[in-house]
Amino acid sequence: DRDVTEGGYSEKRSRFIGILSPCESGERASEIIAATKSKYFDARHTAFCYILKDGTARFSDDGEPHGTAGKPMLDVLEGSGIKDAIVTVTRYFGGVLLGTGGLVRAYSAAAKEAISKSIERRQRLFSISNSDGRIVKLRKVNKPKLEKHNYGTTIGILPEFVQQYTGINKRLA
C-alpha cells in the first residue's frame, strides 16, 4: 500500500520496526495488528497505537512493561496531528534488557521514524513557474505553507497548495 510507511530503530541489538498505516475504524485497526503480528510472527512484541478522526484513541504495550511502548507511541502520533492512522512497532529482542527509559526511547523513535517518512512523502515539492507573479499573489492572499522561499523564476510549494489554488494536478510518486 502506497500510504503505508515504515521506519526502523536499533538499540543494544534489539530491532524495532515502526509502521504507519491509514486506519479508519477499530475493526480495521484489529486487522492491521493481526496482519503485522502474522508478518513478524517470530518477533517478541508488536505494540500499537491509533487515533481516529472521531477522537477515539487506543494503545497497547503488548507485553512490554506498562507505559513503555503504546503510550509513548500514542504521544508521538498525537504530536504529529495525524488522524485515522495506526502505528505498530514490532520488537525483535536482542538479548540485552533496555530498561523502561530505553524502551520508551526506542518505541518512540521507531514511531517517529515511520511518521516522518510519511510526512516527507506528502511534502514533495513541485516547481511552478512564477513568471506571471500568480503564485506570489496567491501566497499573499491565502498564506499557504511554502517549504522553500525562493522568489526567483520558480517556487517550491506543497502539493496540496498546487492542487487547491492553481488547478495543476500532479500525482505524487
Image (cartoon, grey):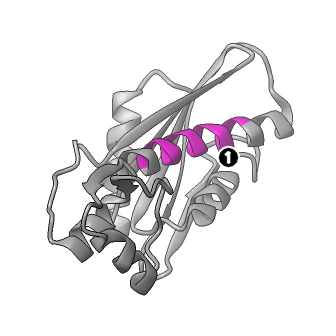
Q: Three-letter amino acid code at disc 1?
A: Ala
Identified at 75% across, 16% down, the residue is 12
How many labels, in total?
A: 1
Instruction: Give the percent coordinates (x, y) of residue 127.
Output: 30, 50
Closest to the observer: 81 or 30? Answer: 81
Closest to the observer: 95 or 129? Answer: 129
Give the quadrant of residue 113: top right
Please identify the dominant SS of the magenta region: helix
Residue 42 is left or right of residue 75, and the answer is left
Give the quadrant of residue 112: top right
Residue 117 counted in the magenta span:
yes
Identified at 42% across, 78% down, the residue is 53
Visible in this render: residue 1? no
Instruction: Give the percent coordinates (x, y) of residue 126.
Output: 30, 50
Q: Quadrant of the N terminus?
A: top left
Instruction: Give the percent coordinates (x, y) of residue 159.
Output: 30, 59
Instruction: Give the percent coordinates (x, y) of residue 129.
Output: 25, 56
Visible in this render: residue 123? yes
Closest to the observer: 116 or 170? Answer: 170
Residue 130 is left or right of residue 62, and the answer is left
Q: Which residue is mark 1?
A: 69
Q: Is residue 170 above or below residue 43?
A: below
Residue 19 is left or right of residue 91, and the answer is left
How packed is label 1: few (under 14 Cα within 10 Å), some, or many (20 or more)?
A: many
Identified at 48% across, 50% down, the residue is 87
Q: Which residues are magenta?
A: 106-118
Closest to the observer: 116 or 142? Answer: 142
Q: Quadrant of the C terminus?
A: top left
Residue 59 counted in the magenta span:
no
The residue positioned farthest toward the bottom in the image shown: 141
SS class, disc 1? loop
Residue 37 is left or right of residue 97, and the answer is left
